[in-house]
Amino acid sequence: MLSAVIISFNEEKNIARCLKSLQAVADEIVVVDSLSTDATKQICESFGVQFIEQKFLGYIEQKNFAITQTKHDFILSLDADEALSDDLKKSILQQKQNSFQYDAYSMNRCTNFCGKWIKHGTWYPDKKIRLINKHKGKWGGVNPHDKLEMQSGSSIQHLKGDLLHYSYYSLEEVITQNNKFTSIQAKAMLQQGKKASLIKLFANPLVAFINGYIFKLGFLDGVDGFFIASSVAYQTMAKYAKLMKLQQKKNA
């Protein structure tokens, strides 16, 4: 048996696609919603899912709360803007028929950027663990970049097929998201005692661009690859710049 979990907030343009992709593999679908003001709730209810309204606790905290609401030992965690490819559905069903012989399963995530699937750079294959025995792992990382972390010694199998990520519909969304996420990152880094410096502020963004655009072949995605590598570099610079300002404010 398999439970699927999703956290959501104002995802009316994405949630139906996500839920449709899960229907063939999940025995239970749990959506934990952060008090959406659009049609997210009505869409979810039309699919007959378990819909739980919970004030947003933070990305990591909200996803761990969602896990506690599931009935089955194995859980598949998706974001509302993600969906399973047909090949990935087949892989999951095969593992389900074999009673999930591993503790966790990873998969490649392929991102759709303004209508184009990105196949290179830091965005692909973007390997993610998303299917786990909930007694062997939980969400960790640094908000907003959460990740499923497994207990030491857990067995992990990689699945065929892509997790389809419908990330951005416009360049404006990228800019807005970068600003939002870097503010969250900077606050989380400050709480963890991490430090910003001029070296990190200048060198890390350059390394991020070269890594994504050249070493990971981002240039093969054309102008989109250049924009994505530049965006990652900007995001790296912005989080350290914001962290530096927070440090200055704290020490003032």
Image (spheres, rainbow, N blue to C red):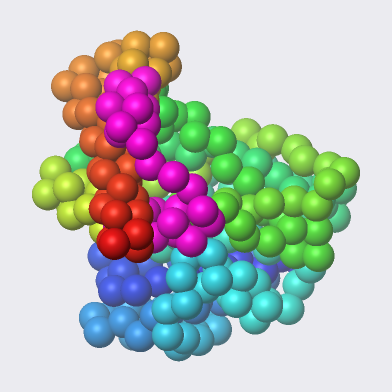
Q: Quadrant of the C terminus?
A: bottom left
- Horizontal and vertical percent for residue 138? 68, 61
- Horizontal and vertical percent for residue 2? 71, 65
Q: Residue furthest front?
A: 252
Kindly indicate the quadrant of the structure image that contains residue 64. bottom right
Q: Is residue 55 above or below residue 183?
A: below
Q: Is residue 13 left or right of residue 48?
A: left
- Horizontal and vertical percent for residue 84? 50, 49
Q: Is residue 33 left or right of residue 240?
A: right
Q: Residue at x 18, y 54 (%)?
A: 176
Viewer-proximal residue among 155 and 208: 208
Q: Is residue 87 above or below residue 176?
A: above
Q: Is residue 67 above or below residue 194?
A: below
Q: How many discs appear?
A: 0
Q: Is residue 193 magenta?
A: yes
Q: Residue furthest left?
A: 172
- Horizontal and vertical percent for residue 37? 25, 84
Q: Residue at x 38, y 42 (%)?
A: 196
Q: Residue at x 68, y 78 (%)?
A: 68
**Would residue 190 be seen by someone viewing this image from the given angle?**
yes
Q: Which residues are magenta?
A: 182-207
Viewer-proximal residue among 6 and 204: 204
